[in-house]
Image: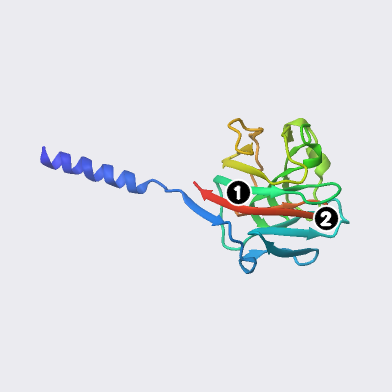
Amino acid sequence: MKIIFTSLMLVMFTWVFAQKKPVVHNYSAIKVADWIIPRTDTLDYAFDNALLLKRKIGNYKSASVAYPKKLNFKNGIIEAYLSWPGKQGGFVGLAFRISDAHHYETLYFRPESSGTINAVQYMPEKKPEFNWWDYEADKYQAKATLPLHGWFHVKLIVKGSTLTVFVDKQPKPVMVYTNLDASLKTGSVGFWLGNCSIGAYKNLVVTNL
């Protein structure tokens, strides 16, 4: 009986320690040297523990991404604060499963479209110039209430092919998308800036599950 009990306890401890524990990566304090930031059209500097990206507007089919060099993410939780301090046409968001500047998934926001179906947008990018018009259907977009220029909190839960999106810590998600691109499996997580002049980002926390 004692041998059986010992064996059961051993199995239990083995199972407990074999469970994958969440790993949290906190990027509240941004060290630009540890990030990959496009130098061709983006300027960067730290302010109030935030990263401000400036972009030369020109190619409406391209975007800029900034992300930590040593982060690898597949499934988990992504949280950050975003803001659009520009004057016209804001496109700010998060990118995940980033393998390079042209291969990643993105979830971005249009503050000027607050309250409409165009406020939230999912899109994969797999080439230097993306076809954003291929993702204009309602299934790729969602309504959300966003401040025009203030900070708003974003939480993404990524699990397999499903993306769940929360805005400003509301209990109900603004979007649940169930068909993430199967070819984009793992990679870094970072900030995304579309065809607009400026975007602000801070307090990125990534939890690998």
Residue 156 falls in image quadrant: top right
Please tell me which residue is depicted at 69% across the width and 46% down the height of the picture. Answer: 151
* Relative horizontal placement of residue 91, taking residue 26 as reference (left or right): right
Q: Residue furthest bottom?
A: 33
* Relative horizontal placement of residue 70, taking residue 19 as reference (left or right): right
Question: Could you tell me how far apart the alpha carbons at marks 2 and 1 are, in whole angstroms?
Answer: 30 Å
Q: Earlier in the sequence, mark 2 or mark 1?
A: 1
Please tell me which residue is depicted at 73% across the width and 56% down the height of the picture. Answer: 102
Does the CB distance between marks 2 and 1 fall below 8 Å? no
Q: How crowded is mark 2: few (under 14 residues within 10 Å), some or many (20 or more)?
A: many
Q: Mark 1 points at which residue?
A: 185
**Mark 2: amino acid:** Ser
Query: Residue 56, how many percent across, how many down?
Result: 85, 60
Q: Name the residue under label 2.
A: 197
- In the foreground, 31 or 191: 31
Please tell me which residue is depicted at 62% across the width and 32% down the height of the picture. Answer: 173
